[in-house]
Image (spheres, helix red, strand yellow):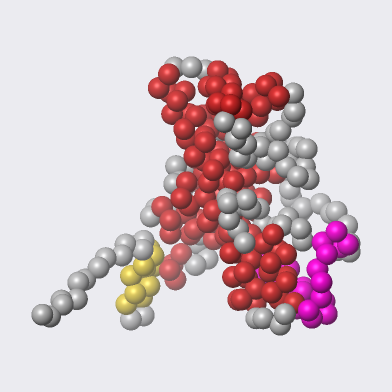
Amino acid sequence: MTIKDETWKTSITKVEPNRLTLRGYRIDELMGNVTFPQVVFLTIKGELPDERASRMLDAMLVSSVDHGVTPPSCIAARTIASTGSPLNAALAGGILAISRHHGGAIEDSMRMLLDAVARKRESGMSETDTADTVVREAREKKKRLPGLGHRVHTNDPRTARLFGIAESLGFAGEYVAMANALAAAVEKSGGKRLPVNVDGALAALLCEMEFSPELANAFFMMARIPGLVSHIYEEQTRMRPMRQIDTKKHEYDGPEERAVPGAVQAAWSGA
């Protein structure tokens, strides 16, 4: 019996001699005319984002570019680089370390927010009452709510900035409100302040932009790659091979804090 090869379909990129089109747009025409975050949006969503969505996604990707040497992905990447492995192997190891407890909180937070907002809509309850219910149920089940609190920051500066930009661009909707309501409900019920962290903020904004929660970790990975590449290169060029990496003993010796040229410090400008 002859097994007939079946033709399968892809709607992402069309490759022809001397022509590449991504979601129908020629890649050589996208080059120089759109930003990388816009192309990320186009590749995943199938359409170019408007200016608002482009600026929002740009800020979201910048927010998670790096968090120093202590995250598991960085430790894994530096350790592999220290053995003499090439950059791609070390980078792969770092990406593989992004999982349920590191970066994975974004997906868990998205699912929590999607469920909470759906319950609010169906029940007609306020955000506050819905959040109180979610927190109470989590406590009864002894479950930790994702996207709240941080091991280093008591007030994650990235969250405030992201939500400020979202407000200016019109993305601070039901999911952002629910994230803040959940943080308030946790503090009210337990007396411990656990503000929304950057994972929770990204989750709320990905919900606002109607991305699937299955893609949540991908945004963290895309954002973190430049940071991991920098750490790998530093390990390869500055450190001795096969060293024992103790992150508690590291010291920062880079540039002192400096102003970002043209940055708006107090509020996001939509101009």
> Viewer-proximal residue, 43 or 196?
196
Q: Residue at x 85, y 59 (%)?
A: 248
Dominant SS type (magenta): helix
From the viewer's perspective, is residue 260 above or below residue 135?
A: below
Residue 207: x, y in percent?
49, 40
> Viewer-proximal residue, 8 or 50?
8
Q: Quadrant of the N terminus?
A: bottom left
Question: Magenta includes 237?
Answer: yes
From the viewer's perspective, is residue 224 above or below residue 130?
A: below
Residue 83 in sight in this render:
yes
Residue 102: x, y in percent?
63, 53
Residue 243: x, y in percent?
81, 75
Q: Residue at x 33, y 81 (%)?
A: 17
- Give the residues drawn in magenta, as a range: 228-250
From the viewer's perspective, is residue 123 above or below residue 256?
A: above
Residue 127 in sight in this render:
no
Q: Is residue 271 left or right of residue 10?
A: right
Question: Magenta includes 155?
Answer: no
Residue lying at the far front of the rendered structure? 141
Q: Is residue 238 left or right of residue 23?
A: right
Residue lying at the far left of the rendered structure? 1
Q: Residue at x 49, y 29 (%)?
A: 116
Q: Is residue 21 left or right of residue 34?
A: left
Residue 51: x, y in percent?
51, 47
Q: Quadrant of the C terminus?
A: top right
Q: Is residue 51 left or right of residue 20?
A: right
Q: Residue at x 71, y 82 (%)?
A: 84
From the viewer's perspective, is residue 160 above or below residue 91?
A: above
